[in-house]
Image (cartoon, rainbow, N blue to C red):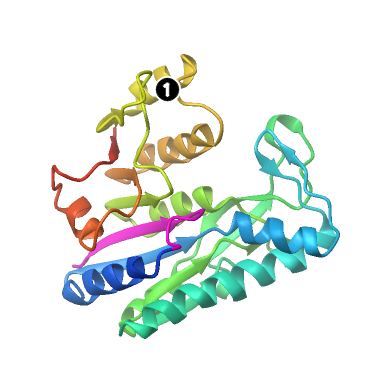
């Protein structure tokens, strides 16, 4: 059985074109033993589109409050523009992809999310994964590229945090590894140095001490959930060279990253 790995592409992590060339090369070299899933975000692009449309952007504890009027814009940006860009870049380098979202054949079922009882509008959390769309892509030897936009059983669309969507899908697909590609090299300690390895209890300690803070707290919370539900290893890093993904999966020691385990 192929090794199942999910990578989450967020922020400006993949702005440089050579990243896609390196990723495509890794995929093609490991096509016989690696089943790869890509989940992406698109926060900067969403903010720009909402601003252009004259829609206010409000964050509550780091979560983008999403009004019903915003959903159509957010879905277009994520499921068409960002998703399409990633697919086009990988196609350019010879990788066949399948564009998906959480709504594709009910891949990810959502329900409204009220963090700490606060109303954040049409923001959801994933409560169930039904992996047939991803399995179909695998059978056709395609790389599933997944937008986090999802819906509930009544068809209501929700904006889903891409980190949380990646964790939920990694759990549902029984992935051994989940890689968060971001614009930083990893989680830093109180001296500003990247911590190479963290257990869940160590990560919680750094959160309590205020060393892990802001957006990284939400990421670590999604990591904790995925580790406790069966994902063996989770990595946080930036794309550093052509072989970054293969180096992560082979534990190449020269790569700067943070790896979380139970």
| Residue indicated by mark 1 | 204
Q: Is residue 235 above or below residue 150?
A: above
Say if the magenta span includes residue 89. no
Identified at 48% across, 39% down, the residue is 219
Confirm whether residue 32 shows in the render. Answer: no
Residue 37, horizontal then vertical, whole percent: 37, 66
Residue 100, horizontal then vertical, whole percent: 52, 74
Q: Residue furthest top?
A: 209
Quarter of the view holding residue 47: bottom right
Confirm whether residue 24 shows in the render. Answer: yes
Q: Which residues are magenta?
A: 1-15
Residue 35 shown left or right of residue 52 in the figure: left
Image quarter of the N terminus: bottom left
Identified at 70% across, 50% down, the residue is 123
Q: Exactly how many numbered labels are in the figure?
A: 1
The answer to which of 197 and 173 lies nearer the viewer is: 197
Q: Is residue 218 above or below residue 248?
A: above
Q: Is residue 19 above or below residue 235?
A: below
Identified at 62% across, 54% down, the residue is 160
Q: Residues within 10 Å of mark 1 (few under 14, many from 20)?
A: some
Identified at 51% across, 75% down, the residue is 85
Residue 31, horizontal then vertical, whole percent: 21, 75
Q: Is residue 26 above or below residue 196?
A: below
Residue 192 shown left or right of residue 133 in the figure: left
Could you say whether the residue bearing mark 1 is in a helix, strand or loop?
A: helix
Residue 131, horizontal then vertical, whole percent: 44, 67
Say if the magenta span includes residue 6. yes
Image quarter of the C terminus: top left
């Amino acid at each position: 059985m192929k090794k199942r790995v999910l990578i989450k592409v967020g922020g400006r992590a993949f702005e440089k074109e050579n990243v896609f060339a390196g990723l495509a090369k890794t995929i093609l070299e490991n096509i016989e033993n690696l089943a790869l899933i890509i989940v992406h975000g698109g926060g900067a692009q969403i903010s720009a589109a909402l601003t252009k449309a004259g829609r206010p952007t409000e964050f509550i504890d780091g979560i983008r409050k999403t009004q019903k009027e915003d959903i159509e814009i957010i879905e277009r940006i994520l499921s068409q523009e960002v998703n399409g860009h990633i697919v086009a870049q990988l196609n350019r380098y010879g990788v066949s992809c399948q564009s998906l979202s959480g709504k594709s054949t009910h891949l990810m079922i959502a329900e409204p999310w009220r963090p700490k009882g606060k109303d954040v509008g049409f923001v959801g959390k994933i409560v169930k994964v039904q992996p047939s769309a991803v399995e179909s892509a695998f059978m056709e030897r395609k790389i599933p590229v997944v937008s986090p936009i999802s819906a509930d059983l009544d068809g209501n669309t929700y904006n889903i945090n891409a980190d949380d969507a990646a964790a939920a899908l990694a759990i549902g697909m029984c992935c051994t590894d989940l890689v968060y590609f971001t614009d930083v090299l990893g989680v830093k300690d109180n001296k500003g140095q990247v911590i190479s390895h963290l257990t869940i209890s160590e990560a919680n300690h750094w959160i309590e001490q205020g060393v892990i803070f802001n957006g990284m707290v939400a990421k670590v919370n999604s990591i904790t959930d995925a580790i406790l539900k069966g994902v063996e290893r989770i990595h946080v890093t930036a794309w550093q060279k052509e072989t970054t993904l293969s180096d992560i999966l082979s534990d190449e020691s020269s790569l700067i990253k943070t790896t979380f385990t139970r």
